[in-house]
Amino acid sequence: MAVLTSYDPSSYHKVAGGEQIEATAVGSVEILAISQLPEVVANARMAQKSWASLSLIERQQYVVKAYQQLEAVQDELASLISQEMGKDYRRATYEVGGTIQNAPYFTGEISDALTTEKLDNRTELQYRPLGVVAVISPWNYPLAMANNLLMPALMAGNSVILKPSEETPLVAELFINTLNKVLPTNVLQLAQGDKALGQALVAADINMVAFTGSMAAGKHIMANAAPGLKRLVMELGGNDPMIVMATANIDAAVRFAVASSFENAGQMCTSTERVYVDERIADEFEQKVVAMASRYQVGKWDQAQVNIGPMVNPAQHQKVLQQLQDAKAKGAQFLLGSDDYSLPFIQPTVVSGITPDMQLEREETFGPVVAISRFSDIAEAIYRANDSQYGLAAVVFGGQGAKAVAEQLEAGMVGVNQGAGAGNAPWVGAKQSGLGFHGTAAGHRQFAQVRVMSY
Ligand code: NAD
């Protein structure tokens, strides 16, 4: 029996003269062999038929009851999130609480969105199940990201196979096993494994892939899903810009720049990745960013006061270091921190003078780094903000004219003097940050086949 072991990110350290890396195991799960996948998919297809024959209200009752079972394991879920991916326990608790508490509301909203609409007395619009949906999820919000896509997929009458991240298999196992105390057999199944299993699942006899993860994986999935023209919803990476105008409330802009760059140790799709600040206020802005960033505490999830955890694994740690080293080599100044940190943490880092040729500006940085550049002309700031394949979120801080600047930004979610995105709006990426979206009636309907019935 092949197993997948998950490791405590805060325990990674080098041994044997710095060549070998060791870590403490949190636990392990059985891997689904690729050869077993056809059987899992066939079971999903069988189960889907009776699941789809239930009314929306009946499915909603099942799902709400299933989510109620999570209340008994919420502490365990939160501590598994912390142990497997390193975020502090307070943040892990929010993630679990949000998932459980929002279930009755979201299932109600989905139910409304998928209710048959009568266009006139001879025509109706129906929202029919697609069949079997593969949900493939990342590790950075291991519960919330799986939940966001599997709930609308189930509610639409599909059966779901969840392939969680190989970094966080135990969270997924507890989540799915708990829901399955209520859900009918095989309506929701778990496929534990790595990227290779994800690829095999996309190629299997399924009808839709609902994916959250990196842009690179998204492109692979799209190509892999093409022969079967499988339906796709893809929530991908971001390289979110922030523009700080001379008229901005500097303290508010500083608070946002630091908090958003450091959230989840910088391992968040909509974290601020690059800050373009008007040169007239740049000295004050940078000084205040450094002062605030210095107060952040780095450490293990169970230590009080910690608000930046470890990088999820040595590869991610190395990637952030590489980006910092590249910036240093190309002339960036380090206002706080350095380009040299040992496993498993990256200390709060503030870099100034980033330029378009640096990886820090071009790539998604999954670490606690505030990367700043000064501008003299707002048109230049807008150009650089948009000069990216990514288009997830973007933010502008400023007085009059800030909204006009925001209107020119190429992103799915744009915030003016606040974070981007809203609770009652779709979660959506523009350009290569996504394809389709979830949330709100329009998002829920992407998990269903529209059928026009004329009679
Ligand atoms: P990842 O793309 O490496 O992996 C995500 C999942 O996809 C994992 O389960 C992995 O096993 C699987 N996978 C990887 N390659 C695959 C392939 N070719 N075919 C099928 N499955 C494949 O991403 P990650 O490192 O787990 O997560 C971080 C990324 O996710 C970041 O880019 C982040 O911005 C993004 N993200 C986006 C959102 C959003 O809402 N837009 C939310 C969270 C995370």
Image: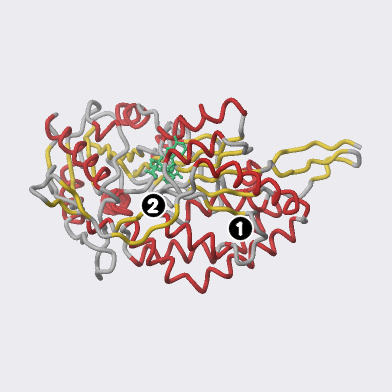
Mark 1 vs mark 2, foreground winner is 2
Q: Does any portion of residue 179 appear in the rendered image? A: yes
Tell me the residue at 55%/44% (across/down).
Answer: 36
Q: Amino acid at mark 1?
A: Phe
Instruction: State whether residue 94 is above or below residue 438.
Output: below
Q: Nearer the viewer, residue 418 or 102?
A: 102
Q: What residue sits right under mark 2 in the picture?
A: 4
Q: Amino acid at mark 2?
A: Leu
The numbered disc on residue 96 is none
Where is residue 410 shown, x and y percent of the image?
A: 44, 32
Q: What residue sits right under mark 1 in the picture?
A: 106
Tell me the residue at 52%/34% (across/down).
Answer: 435
Where is residue 195 shown, x and y percent of the image?
A: 42, 40
| Colour scheme | secondary structure
Q: Secondary structure at mark 1?
A: helix
Separation of residues labelled 1 and 2 (CA atoms)? 32 Å
- Tell me the crowding category of disc 1: few under 14, some 14 to 19, or many 20 or more residues within 10 angstroms, Cα based: many
* Ligand 1 image-quadrant field: top left
- Furthest residue to the left? 17
Where is residue 174 shown, x and y percent of the image?
A: 48, 63
Tell me the residue at 43%/31% (across/down).
Answer: 408
Q: Nearer the viewer, residue 294 or 77?
A: 77
Q: Which label's residue is closer to the chain start, 1 or 2?
A: 2
Instruction: State whether residue 319 is above or below residue 31.
Output: above
Q: Does any portion of residue 336 appear in the rendered image? A: no
Q: Locate the C terminus and report the quarter of the image it occupies.
A: top right
364 relative to 235 in the view: left or right:
left
